[in-house]
Image: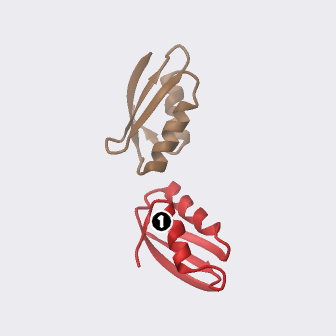
Chain colours: A red, B brown
């Protein structure tokens, strides 16, 4: 299991938090996702044999947020 | 039909806008609700024989936002 914290721009409220966490949790291979609104990031634990960083970034971007490299 | 603009605190994003508009539109007697995020308010058109201002405020507050007098 890998863990990574992604910087995400534009998350402003609890709905944003839920959207991002929900999108990540729907990906096969993601075991947990925790948004920190104050820090503007999301900590993800995932199995890198099942899900890629690119897929996680795409899932966040589909919710309308920008992910920093 | 009456129209009124209510000042609402804490709406920060499109999800907030949808939550507040959706809660108001579910009330019988509300014909339209339009949130302005920048201004921090919601313009409501309603039939005051069917819905009260108090009920509209309560619907907004149930979504987690404060309504100013």
Residue reaching furthest to the left: B39
Chain letter for the residue marked with disc 1 in the picture: A
**Residue A45 placement: quadrant:** bottom right
x and y, in percent, of residue B15 in the image: 49, 49
x and y, in percent, of residue A22 in the image: 60, 62
x and y, in percent, of residue B43 in the image: 39, 30
Total marks in image: 1
Q: In the visual, does B26 lie left or right of A29?
A: left
Instruction: Please name whichever residue, A50 or B35, is drawn nearer the observer in this view of the structure.
Output: A50
x and y, in percent, of residue B22 in the image: 54, 37
Q: In which quadrant is the C terminus of chain A drawn?
A: bottom left
Pointer 1 residue: A61
Instruction: Please name whichever residue, B66 or B60, is drawn nearer the observer in this view of the structure.
Output: B60
Q: In the visual, does A66 lie left or right of B59?
A: left
Q: In the visual, does B54 lie left or right of B36?
A: right
Q: Residue at x 49, y 39 (%)?
A: B20
Task: Bin the neighbour count of mark 1 within 10 Å (Cα to Cα): few under 14, some 14-19, many 20 and up.
Answer: some
Q: Is residue A63 above or below residue A68?
A: above
Instruction: Please name whichever residue, B5 or B66, is drawn nearer the observer in this view of the structure.
Output: B5
Q: Residue at x 58, y 31 (%)?
A: B26
Q: In which quadrant is the N terminus of chain A drawn?
A: bottom right
Q: Residue at x 47, y 28 (%)?
A: B32
Q: Is residue B29 above or below residue A27?
A: above
Q: Residue at x 41, y 38 (%)?
A: B35
**In the structure shown, which secondary structural element does the residue marked by tag 1 occupy?**
helix
Q: Is residue B32 above or below residue A22?
A: above
């Amino acid at each position: 299991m890998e863990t990574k914290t992604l910087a995400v721009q534009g998350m402003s409220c609890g709905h944003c938090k839920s959207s991002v966490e929900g999108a990540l949790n729907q990906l096969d291979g993601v075991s947990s996702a925790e948004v920190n609104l104050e820090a503007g990031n999301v900590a993800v634990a995932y199995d890198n044999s099942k899900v890629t960083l690119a897929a996680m970034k795409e899932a966040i971007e589909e919710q309308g947020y920008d992910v920093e490299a």
